[in-house]
Image: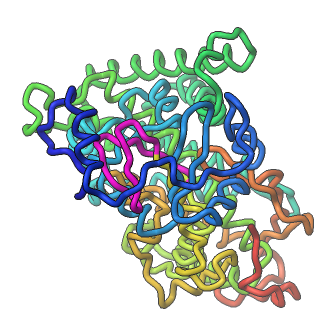
């Protein structure tokens, strides 16, 4: 690639190489990239990013394919087009994991697979991959299905549920089953995981947008965040040590992490206790938040569209009427898969991510020097008018004839750093929707559209729905479900 230093260029020659790379080129410097208006001294654009991050980021494409914003004194180059975003993702040696969010996340998860730098990634990926082998994933399905059925069975007719709270509880329990198996995880450790990970997951974005010097202030938030981080790591290290000493494969993800071997890594051929702990925190945090948010949005979208919901009910009935769910049986739930795909398009997890330039390079006709932070947003790419018809509308039927393109559908990222647990997340979401659809119709309790609360993921605020039993005295049998007058709701109406 033009402007890229040779792989063996010594670190001390970076400045010289940068100068040489700039000579004889028509590329422009970063200062020629349009800057977003409204930056404040010292704070930059931190205030609009905290107040209305989705609105602020959505305004940036009007400035061009690239735009500059400022987080504190740090300049960030925002990528707004699919081709440039894909270029950043597939060249992970040049555009390494970095930026304010990743720096803060590493304080929390150490060298977790999702945040570790490129120099560590390939080894960690090889050691984590067996935990997500298709044969291993198939063993997780019955456990997740049981948790989904228990959740759906716990509701009663006419109940108004706090949708996000219910989906978070389901996601936590299903991730615990996948990671540890419930019988192997002490109840006290499970409670600690839930409490501390909620504190840390909601606080990491706030940390990323505030100067590190403020960490030392004895505020209630800082004390709570620090206490949660320390307690979580202590609990998990103790669990890993105990499990390793037991030397037994319980069929869960933790057992596979402990026993994984990579002969290509020489002396570092197995994961240390600290590395296993880093991966557990990463998988737990990412699995709970992304699954809970995706399910919440999917159910909110379905509640106003009975014609779409009734098709999921038929698939849920078919799955419930059969034997134990398997990966093969889940593949038959086509309409459910389309709803999940469309929900992830509109509200992708990890909607705003950053990378850090590791070598002098060029992006969109502009020179980028090492240390430059580059941001990309799957939310922007997924709503790009040049890719999807009616991009702000919920139209799951678009996926009947459209296959997600890896360069423009980035719900799980792309390239070598694509989410390793994407299939487990899809299985969790599909099983939960099937279990709910086989028992319940969900109705809105207000005409107001939920507002977005943007953190690492996009979460709806005040998401409540009323559940109505589909079956009871005098109700139709599965496969012959009547719908309400609400069927007139347009499938393509927007909820954003």
Q: What's the residue at 54%, 40% (across, down)? A: 75
Q: Quadrant of residue 415?
A: bottom left
Residue extending furthest toward the front: 24
Instruction: Say whether residue 256 is visible.
Output: no
Q: Is residue 152 magenta?
A: no
Picture quarter with the C terminus: bottom right
* Residue 21 position within the rendered picture, expressed as x and y whole percent measured from the top left: 25, 48
Horizontal side of 43 relative to 177 (left or right) equals right
Q: Quadrant of residue 370?
A: top left
Q: Residue 153, relative to residue 229: is it above or below? A: below
Horizontal side of 285 relative to 311 (left or right) equals left
The span picked out in magenta is 351-373
Instruction: Say whether residue 300 is visible.
Output: yes
Nearest to the observer: residue 290 or residue 391: 391
Picture quarter with the N terminus: bottom left
Q: Residue 342, relative to residue 375: is it above or below? A: below
Q: What's the residue at 44%, 66% (across, down)? A: 324
Q: What's the residue at 70%, 66% (across, down)? A: 299
């Amino acid at each position: 690639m033009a402007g890229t230093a040779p792989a063996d260029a010594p670190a001390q020659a970076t400045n010289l190489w940068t100068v040489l790379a700039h000579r004889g080129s028509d590329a422009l410097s970063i200062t020629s990239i349009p800057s977003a208006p409204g930056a404040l001294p010292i704070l930059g654009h931190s205030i609009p990013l905290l107040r209305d991050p989705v609105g602020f980021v959505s305004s940036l494409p009007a400035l061009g394919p690239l735009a500059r914003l400022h987080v504190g004194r740090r300049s960030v180059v925002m990528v707004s087009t699919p081709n440039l975003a894909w270029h950043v993702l597939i060249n992970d040696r040049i555009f390494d994991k970095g930026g304010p969010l990743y720096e803060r996340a590493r304080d929390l998860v150490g060298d977790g697979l999702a945040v570790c730098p490129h120099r560590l990634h390939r080894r960690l990926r090889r050691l984590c991959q067996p935990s997500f082998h298709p044969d291993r994933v198939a063993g997780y399905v019955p456990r997740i299905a049981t948790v989904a059925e228990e959740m759906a069975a716990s509701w009663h007719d006419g109940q108004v549920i706090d949708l996000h709270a219910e989906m978070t509880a389901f996601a936590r329990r299903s991730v615990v089953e996948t990671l540890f198996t419930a019988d192997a995880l002490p109840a006290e450790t499970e409670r600690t995981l839930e409490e501390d990970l909620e504190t840390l997951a909601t606080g990491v974005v706030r940390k990323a947008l505030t100067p590190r010097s403020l960490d030392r202030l004895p505020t209630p938030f800082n004390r709570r965040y620090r206490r949660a981080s320390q307690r979580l790591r202590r609990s998990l290290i103790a669990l890993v040590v105990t499990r390793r000493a037991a030397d037994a494969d319980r069929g869960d993800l933790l057992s596979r992490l402990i026993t994984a071997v990579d002969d290509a890594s020489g002396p570092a051929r197995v994961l240390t206790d600290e590395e296993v702990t880093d991966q557990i925190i990463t998988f737990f945090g990412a699995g709970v938040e992304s699954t809970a948010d995706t399910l919440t949005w999917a159910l909110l979208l379905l509640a106003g569209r009975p014609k779409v919901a009734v098709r999921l009910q038929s698939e849920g009935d078919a799955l419930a009427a059969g034997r134990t769910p398997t990966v093969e049986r889940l593949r038959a739930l086509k309409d459910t898969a389309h709803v999940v795909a469309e929900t992830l398009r509109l509200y992708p997890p990890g909607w705003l991510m950053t990378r850090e330039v590791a070598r002098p390079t060029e992006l969109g006709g502009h020179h980028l020097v090492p240390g430059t932070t580059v941001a990309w947003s799957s939310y922007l790419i997924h709503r790009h008018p040049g890719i999807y018809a009616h991009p702000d509308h919920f139209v799951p039927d678009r996926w009947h004839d459209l296959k997600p393109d890896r360069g423009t559908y980035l719900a799980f990222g792309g390239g070598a750093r694509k989410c390793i647990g994407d299939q487990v997340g899809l299985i969790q979401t599909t099983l939960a929707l099937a279990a709910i659809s086989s028992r319940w119709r969900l109705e809105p309790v207000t005409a107001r559209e939920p507002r977005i609360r943007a953190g690492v993921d996009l979460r709806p605020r005040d998401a409540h729905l009323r559940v109505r039993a589909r079956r009871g005295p005098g109700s139709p049998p599965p496969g012959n479900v009547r719908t309400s007058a609400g069927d007139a709701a347009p499938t393509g109406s927007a909820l954003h």
